[in-house]
Image (cartoon, grey):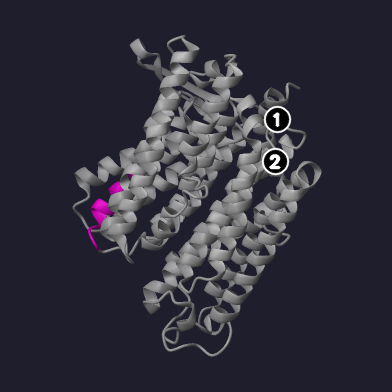
Amino acid sequence: MNAAAPLMGLPLLSIIALAPLVGALAIALFGGNPRAPRVIAFVSATVCLVSTVVVWTGYDRAIGGLQFIESVPWIESLGISYTLGVDGISIPMLALMSIVLFTGVLVSWDIDNRPREFFVLLLLLVTGVFGVFVAVDAFLLFFFYEMAVLPMYLLIAVWGSTRKDYSAMKLTLFLFAGSALLIVLLALVYWQVGLGTFDMRVWAAHGFSSGFQHWAFLLALVGFGTLIPIWPLHTWSPDGHVAAPTAVSMMHAGVLLKIGAYGVIRLGIALFPEGVSYWWMLVAVIGAINVVYGAFCAMSQTDLKYVIGYSSVSHMGYVLLGFSMASGAGAQWGLEGAVFQMFAHGMMTALFFALIGYVYEKTHTRKIAEISGLMERTPLVAAGFVVASAASMGIPSTSGFVAELLVYIGLIRTRPVFAAIAFVGVVITAGYLIRMLTSILLGEPSIAVKPLTDPRPLRALPIVMLALTIMAAGIFASPVYDTIASGVLPLVERLTGG
């Protein structure tokens, strides 16, 4: 595809990445009217969603590789360029972010505490996330990565709850520590390549020494791993989920964790195949701990947000287990499963937090012991909890089933011990989710729940949209799977020398 003239003659990737930034500037300049910030954010989200659909449908899976490439010199003296492109790995991530942004704006429609500033920061955060998923230049990827992290502090500290200042500061310190390692990684690779460029295609073609690959991959794993989050660097994540306002929780668990995993793929696995092979055991052990430890922690929680926060730690462990197979016979299964899990987990957690946010706004409690009878008072919300929980448990006909199945096939064939350990996490996950559903859905409506009714259409749309996406990706998995496979297969060939 012509780099200068993407589909329909439009720079679609720039539109996707920069529409939120334009929206943020428009709100800052013209958002004095109380309704304007919401409308502008909604228009920006719609532009991103429609453009992403065009990119998804226009991507040629038979050819694969990077497409829709745009490139403009930026800081030529350092070899930095504004180069964008997408493949089968990044397109599902764009779709995930577009859907979560669209639904997140609708969920935030009734925010009355400084809505102008809220939507400006929300759109700046989203600009960074989109930028990470389309960047081909490593410096540009890091630039967008930092843009995604910075607004989180203010969004949590100003609009959050439950120890919001502590949670915001803890999140920021952890992620900046990871960023410091990534700066070192970029500088070392730039110097090692020696061609004066940050183009990751050039970096991937360079033959790094074995020793360099070993330590460079570890830097990428720990640097980006703080955002995945990997154990034991995970403790900021549940606190951040709980403290954040609803839309930010949706994006935090649904998408921000994925840019950490995405960074490991782009600046770790793709560049340092020998490093992946050298550290596979470490990655697998951390992944197994994430799965089991996160599930045990979720089981002991009494706050709905903390349950899903620790559940996210557990489910991202499957992504790490998929990464651990990247250099062996299970590379294709592992990487396809990891990317599918990133997409599936993003949808299910966004739905969970949208539901919990609605219940909290109406009842002013997230305590499981104080919530019962949702099925009687609000059938739509109850159905949403069932769909999200089914995906989290990996029930067939949901996206979570397809993702976990791919990872387990690879593990059983190549890492059976870790497959057995991870299966413990599945059992625990089913236990705490069934217990949670039994408590909050069944029985007589509690005092807090009695005033609750089904949400009005504007608030119901995000729930329906996310639930249908989860079901569609599970029942009709081929569009998502085929797209992911077209991006994973070239990477597997490089990793295995095929």
**In the image, which residues are magenta?**
113-124
Seen in the picture, residue 401 relative to 48 is either above or below; the reply is below
Q: Is residue 298 left or right of residue 147?
A: right
Is 426 inside the magenta-drawn segment? no
Residue drawn where x is 25% and y is 46% of the image: 27
Disc 2: which residue:
334
Q: Quadrant of residue 468?
A: bottom right
Disc 1: which residue:
489
Q: Is residue 278 visible?
A: yes
Residue drawn where x is 61% and y is 41% of the image: 283
Q: Is residue 407 left or right of residue 200?
A: right
Q: Main secondary structure of the magenta part?
A: helix
Q: Quadrant of residue 44?
A: top left
Can you give x and y, in whole percent of width and height, for residue 251 in the image? Answer: 44, 52
Q: Quadrant of the N terminus?
A: top right
Residue drawn where x is 51% and y is 60% of the image: 310
- Near mark 2 (Cα within 10 A), the count class, few <14, some 14-19 or many ≥20, is many
Is 116 inside the magenta-drawn segment? yes
